[in-house]
Amino acid sequence: MAPDAVATLPDQAMAPEPWRIHSVRRDVASNEVFSWTLYPEPGVEPGAAPAPGQFNMLYLFGVGEVPISVSAITDDGGIVHTIRAVGSVTRAMQDLEAGTVVGLRGPFGTAWPLEQPRGRDLVLVAGGIGLAPLRPVIHAALQRRSEFGRVVVCYGARSPGDMIFRDELDAWAERDDVDLRITVDRGTAAWRGDVGVVTQLVDRGGFDRRNTLALTCGPEVMMRFTASALERRGLKPEDIYVSMERNMRCAVGFCGHCQIGAHFVCRDGPVFPYPVMEPAFRVREL
Amino acid sequence: MNELLAIIEEQPFFEDMEPEHRRLLAACAAKCSYTAGTRLMRDHEPTETFWLIREGQVALESPLREGSVAFQTLGTGDILGWSWLLPPYRASYDARAVTDIHTLRFDAGVLRERMEADPAFGYVLMKHFAALIVQRLQAARLQALDIYSHGGPGHGA
C-alpha cells in the first residue's frame, strides 16, 4: 500500500477528556437504567455540541470504555447520557455518584436528519431504552415545533415499570401538538394504557404517508418490524432511518469492531437510512 | 347505508376492495357504541360478529384462575374478531371495552353466507383477514421474544 493511502488516526482521537458527573438520575426501579449529566472539567475545551443521534465514548478509568448515545443536551453545555447496565463496564458505572470524573471522547457518528424539508410529519418509534437516542429529537422537534407537521411518538416498553423518562412522557402526553402513543409488552393490573408491540401503534397511522420522516431506535428485530409497518402504511424506505448498535471501540472507523458489511457503524452510523441497513437486517448473525 | 359506506371507505383495512364488495360490507354493518367495561366477546362463547373500532380502546384478555390478563389492546382503526371465519365460530379470548367505544359492528354470520355465495368476495375478505391474522401473529411472536430484556441500542457494554 502506498504511504499516502495509509489511514491515520485524527489527532487526539483516542484521548478522553475529563468530565464530571454533575447529577445521576435513576429511571427504572431495578436501578438498571441511569442517566448522567456531565460537564467538562476546568481546562477542557469541549468540541462541537453533539447533534441528536450522535454518541460519545465514556471511559471509566481502569475499567473500560463504552459507546453511549446522547439523550439530552442542556442549555449550559451539559451532556446527558442514559445508560443501561448490561456489561462489565456499564455495571461498574451503575453505582457511581455525582462528583465522579469519567473520561469522554466525542461526539462521534451521524445524526438524525432533522434538517430535511420543513412541513413533514415526524414519526418517532422507540423501543425500550431506544427512547434515549430519540429523546433529543423530541426536544428539538418541540423547540422547532412549527417546522414539522404532525409529531407522532410511539414508545414500546417491556412493562410499565421499565418505562424511562416517565415525567417527560407525562408532559408530552399533556401537549396537544404531540401524539404520544405508549404500549407495553406486559401490562399490570394497574396499567390502563395499551398492551402489545410498538409496531401496532404504527399500524394505527395518523400521519401523511406521502410526507413523513420516520426515525426508529430499539432492538434490531423491533426496527425491522417497525420499518415493515411503516412501509405497510405507505412510507417509502428512504423516508425511514434506523440507529444501529454495535460493539464500537475506536469510534473513528479504524478498528473494525463495529463493521456491518462495508459500513463502520461508528463512522458511517449509528444513524443510517433504512435502505442502507435493510440488506444487513436479512443476514443472520451479522 | 351511505354513511356506513363512507366510514368503510376511509379505513385502511378495506383499502384495495372493489366498491361492490364495500357495499356488501356496508349492508351488513351498523354503528354501535359500548360503555367502558362491556364484554364484547367471551372466551369459548359463539361469535358471529366482528367490529371496526372507530374510537376507544378494547383489551383482549385471557381468563386465568387469578383473574383476566390483557395480552393486547386494540384501538382506533383496528379490527376486533376473526373467530367467526372458521368453525367452531367461538371466541378464543375475552374482549372488553376499556373506554367507551364507538364501532362499526358487522353481522359476520350473514357476511359468511355471502362469502360462500360469492367466492370472489369471499376470497377478497379472507385475504384481508389473513393479512390481519399474520400481522397479529408476528406481533405476538415479537412480544413473546421479550426483546427489551437484553442490552439496548448504544447504551452499554
Image (spheres, helix red, strand yellow):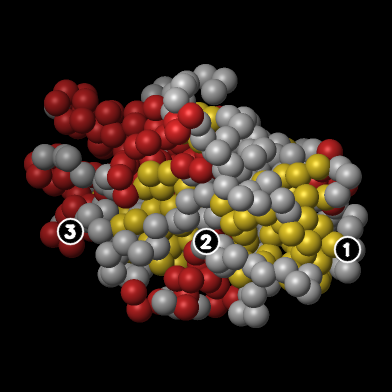
**Residue farthest along the front direction in this orientation:** A3
- Residue A146 image offset from top left, x and y in percent: 35, 78
Helix, strand or loop status at disc 2: loop
Residue B140 in view in this figure: no
Q: Pinpoint residue A177: horizontal percent, then vertical percent.
A: 42, 76
Relative placement, left or right, of B103 versus A244 is: left
**What's the amino acid at mark 3?**
Ala
Q: Is disc 2 in the same subunit as disc 1?
A: yes
User: Are the residues tagged 3 and 1 within 8 Å (C-beta)?
Assistant: no
Evaluate whether label 3 is on the same chain as label 2: no
Q: Amino acid at mark 2?
A: Pro
Q: Quadrant of the C terminus of chain A?
A: top right
Within-10-Å neighbours for mark 2: few <14, some 14–19, many 20+: many
Residue at mark 3 shares a chain with residue at mark 1: no
The part of the image, by quadrant, that contains residue A164 is bottom right
- Of helix, strand and loop, which one carries label 3? helix
Residue under circle 3?
Answer: B6
Pointers 3 and 2 in contact (C-beta within 8 Å): no
- Tag 1: amino acid: Thr
- The residue that mark 1 highlights is A100
Task: Work out how far the residue at label 3 is from the one at label 2, CA to CA, in angstroms.
Answer: 42 Å
Residue lying at 81% horizontally and 42% vertically, measured from the top left: A64
Chain letter of disc 3?
B
